[in-house]
Image (cartoon, rainbow, N blue to C red):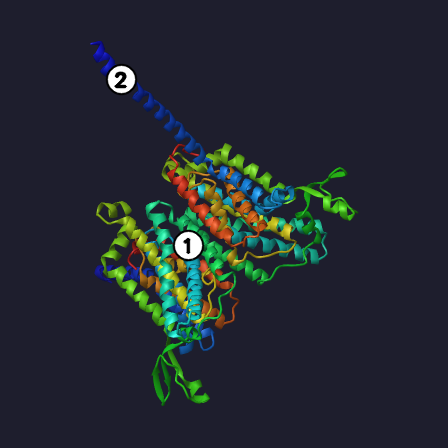
């Protein structure tokens, strides 16, 4: 073997290691899918794969907002209860608007829009506290965590809100495409007047909730990657002083970042209402830490400056696949906490040992 | 000339004198106002606690009662233990999110050991003792893992302890399969709910042992003085206040929080110290877990929504610590917990739904940080 060959193979081995380190989350996801499809029953069916995507929407949406915040070097602990707040306000407005005599077609979108607008308020408060009053993000958003939870319990009177327009559930559980083999294809509307047998063979493709979630994820992914707003976000996380000196209005930028985070939280609240046709104050309480985990697995650093939407999507899918797979294998649910805790620590250790990877993913 | 003097110079001199006097007066007043502001700003949490006690005593019926104050202390014990451990971690500039679930983990382990030994026919005292010791010993493990991850592998404390948070929770749930653990030695509950002294006014007084064979009137008049769990907690807190305030270990803790590089240059073994700090934190959680077993008489895991760790962190911050490290005292933390628990008890007694507590906690927490920001800096280390 000549020197050149040896050098080349060493370099390619190094490059392979780098590639492995950069894409380990993706590989882990594939490993999970392979493992569960070998061990589980019907894991690779279309239905189950779609279930995974439905299961990941909440973590994905909360994680999207969290991605922006974590890139700036902050953290948003309030997303879980802001999601509950969004779910409760959305459900409440649907009930109120319906009681006011509006048709279902008007009351549902109107309530959703009102809820999304109100949902900007927690973010505005968080952002003001963090950016203007210099409260550490951990404490400001933890304060909001308590306030949002308390207010949503007051609005919902400590019970799930019921009596929503029935069309909400229809919208939330709809699919983009229905295919009845050898008979018909319909968009959005579930085919009527078909036999039981045809009903059983009907394919429903792409849940509408996933579509809505990914539209917003796509938009904000573009914002983060291709616009000045996104570049400024990375700049603030990389070095606040440098960002200030280069003329970025850090204060207002941070405020907008926290508003994006609470917007995504209320959006997932709205989707929760559409899917489950109820509003609960604790809709997202357990999901806040999952969202942080997804972002960190996706390669972001809590010190700021790194992170990408792609990574967060993979992180959310890892968590959702794990949950779905464990249900499939009927492994007790609580084992997920152990596994997710382990993955989280390993994720950070990989970033520690391959510092050259940080920011590349 | 006299005229000039009379009409111009004298008024001018008077005017000047007046101005100087006013300036001096203002200066003095400003200074003292500043000093008052500083004084109140540094101790606002204690003032706030007193204010709250006064307001609730005037507003809520039966709030100002010996039994109620005992209750506040009784319910504070678990939180104050978690928060005291958290104080050490936060002073070093870290954070420990795992304390709530470590408490649940130790609780489950200790009670399983107690139940099994008791079922195997061992004496109650023996099974309780072994159960408690096993629980405390296992409580070291999460802290050791946290400490090694943070100090040796440089994992950010938030992430490292979030990992053990999940693992402790998962292990506890797998051990107890999501159900409370019954059939513990019956004596455990008796010990956990005993008082240091019992008093029936004008009749009898007893240490440790609850007077037996009482009639209904005596039973109603019976006053328990200082619950045993509160007593244990107070002793532990006094010991660790001493360690934090008066020993080299405590000084090193503040030094690491003040500046890690300076601490390393000063020859402090920072990784070793940090590992010990995280072990202290999880030992506090373990003690809370064991006390919980004795108090409830059953073993139970920590539910996902209980947010113990967040209330502990809130109390530490309300008590004057900074998440940037270098600041904080156990005394302040105790005041922070007492504020939160007084609030909860007070709201309960006045019949206000308990979830207002979350709003109030959030507001007080934010107020604490903002007050800390606007209070001019004077102290350096533990004031």
Circle 2/circle 1 CB separation < 8 Å: no
Residue A19 falls in image quadrant: bottom left
Residue B283 seen in the figure: no
Residue A231 seen in the figure: yes
Front residue of B317 and B116: B317
Asked which secondary structure carries label 2, the reply is helix
The residue that mark 2 highlights is B11
x, y percentage for residue A53?
39, 70
- Judge the density around disc 2: few (<14), some (14-19), many (≥20) Cα neighbours within 10 Å: few
- Judge the density around disc 1: few (<14), some (14-19), many (≥20) Cα neighbours within 10 Å: many
Q: Quadrant of the N terminus of chain A?
A: bottom left
Residue drawn at x 26%, y 51% is A235
Q: Nearer the viewer, mark 2 or mark 1?
A: 2
x, y percentage for residue B13?
27, 16
Front residue of B342 and B378: B342
x, y percentage for residue A31?
40, 68
Subunit under mark 1: A
The residue that mark 1 highlights is A77
Left or right of A263 on screen, residue A148: right
Query: Which numbered marker is on residue B229?
Result: none
Furthest residue in direction front, as rendered: B3
Furthest residue in direction top, as rendered: B2
Q: Quadrant of the C terminus of chain A?
A: bottom left
x, y percentage for residue B184?
67, 56
* Picture layout, residue B190 above or below residue B242: below
Subunit under mark 2: B
Measure the C-alpha gap from mark 2 to mark 1.
Answer: 65 Å
* Callout 2 and callout 1 share a chain: no
Left or right of A302 on screen, residue B143: right
Asked which secondary structure carries label 1, the reply is loop
Front residue of B226 and B350: B350
């Amino acid at each position: 073997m000549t020197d050149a060959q040896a050098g080349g193979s060493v370099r390619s081995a190094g490059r392979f290691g780098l590639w492995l380190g950069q894409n380990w989350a993706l590989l882990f996801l594939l490993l999970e899918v392979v493992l569960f499809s070998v061990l589980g029953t019907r894991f690779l069916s279309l239905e189950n794969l779609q279930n995974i995507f439905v299961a990941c929407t909440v973590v994905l949406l909360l994680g999207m907002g969290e991605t922006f915040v974590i890139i700036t070097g902050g953290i948003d602990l309030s997303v879980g209860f802001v999601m509950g707040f969004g779910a409760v306000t959305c459900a409440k407005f649907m009930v109120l608007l319906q009681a006011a005599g509006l048709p279902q077609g008007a009351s549902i979108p109107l309530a959703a829009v009102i809820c999304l607008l109100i949902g900007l308020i927690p973010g505005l408060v968080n952002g003001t506290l963090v950016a203007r009053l210099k409260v550490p993000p951990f404490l400001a958003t933890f304060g909001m965590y308590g306030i949002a939870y308390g207010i949503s319990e007051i609005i919902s009177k400590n019970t799930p809100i019921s009596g929503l327009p029935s069309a909400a559930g229809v919208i939330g559980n709809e699919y983009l495409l229905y295919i009845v083999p050898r008979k018909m294809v319909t968009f959005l509307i579930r085919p009527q007047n078909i036999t039981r047998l045809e009903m059983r063979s009907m394919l429903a493709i792409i849940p509408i909730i996933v579509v809505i979630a990914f539209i917003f994820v796509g938009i904000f992914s573009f914002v983060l990657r291709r616009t000045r707003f996104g570049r400024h976000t990375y700049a603030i996380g990389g070095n606040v002083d440098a960002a200030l000196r280069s003329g970025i209005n850090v204060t207002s930028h941070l405020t907008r970042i926290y508003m994006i985070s609470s917007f995504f939280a209320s959006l997932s609240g709205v989707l929760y209402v559409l899917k489950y046709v109820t509003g609960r104050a604790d809709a997202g309480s357990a999901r806040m830490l999952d969202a942080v985990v997804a972002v960190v697995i996706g390669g972001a650093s809590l010190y700021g400056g790194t992170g990408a939407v792609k990574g967060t999507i993979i992180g959310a899918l890892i968590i959702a696949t794990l949950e779905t797979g464990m249900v499939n294998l009927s492994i007790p649910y609580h084992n997920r906490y152990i596994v997710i805790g382990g993955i989280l620590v390993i994720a950070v250790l990989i970033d520690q040992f391959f510092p050259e990877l940080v920011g590349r993913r | 000339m006299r005229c000039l003097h009379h009409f111009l110079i004298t008024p001018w001199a008077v005017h000047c004198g007046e101005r100087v006097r006013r300036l001096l007066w203002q200066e003095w007043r400003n200074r003292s106002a500043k000093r008052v502001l500083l004084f109140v700003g540094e101790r606002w949490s204690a003032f706030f606690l007193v204010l709250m006690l006064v307001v609730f005593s005037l507003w809520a019926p039966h709030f100002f009662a010996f039994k109620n104050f005992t209750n506040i202390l009784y319910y504070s014990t678990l939180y104050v233990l978690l928060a005291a451990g958290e104080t050490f971690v936060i002073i070093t500039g870290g954070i420990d999110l795992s304390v709530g679930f470590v408490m649940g983990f130790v609780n489950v382990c200790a009670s399983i050991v107690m139940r099994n030994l008791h079922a195997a026919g061992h004496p109650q005292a023996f099974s309780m003792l072994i159960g408690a010791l096993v629980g405390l010993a296992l409580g070291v493990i999460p802290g050791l893992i946290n400490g090694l991850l943070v100090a040796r592998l440089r994992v950010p404390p938030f992430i490292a302890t979030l990992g053990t948070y999940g693992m402790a929770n998962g292990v506890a749930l797998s051990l107890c399969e999501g159900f409370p653990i019954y059939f513990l030695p019956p004596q455990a509950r008796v010990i956990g709910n005993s008082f240091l002294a019992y008093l029936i006014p004008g009749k009898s007084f007893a240490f440790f042992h609850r007077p037996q064979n009482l009639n209904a009137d005596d039973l109603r008049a019976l006053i328990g003085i200082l619950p045993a769990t509160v007593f244990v907690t107070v002793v532990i807190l006094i010991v660790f206040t001493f360690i934090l305030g008066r020993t080299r270990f405590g000084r090193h803790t503040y030094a690491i929080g003040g500046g890690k590089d300076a601490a390393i240059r000063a020859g402090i073994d920072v990784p070793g110290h940090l590992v010990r700090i995280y072990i202290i934190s999880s030992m506090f959680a373990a003690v809370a877990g064991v006390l919980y077993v004795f108090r409830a008489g059953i073993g139970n895991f920590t539910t996902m929504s209980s947010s113990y760790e967040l209330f502990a962190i809130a109390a530490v911050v309300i008590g004057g610590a900074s998440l940037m490290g270098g600041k904080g005292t156990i005394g302040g933390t105790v005041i922070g917990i007492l504020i939160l628990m007084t609030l909860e008890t007070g709201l309960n007694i006045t019949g206000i739904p308990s979830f207002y507590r979350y709003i109030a906690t959030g507001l007080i927490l934010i107020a604490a940080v903002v007050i800390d920001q606007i209070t001019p800096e004077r102290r350096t280390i533990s004031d």
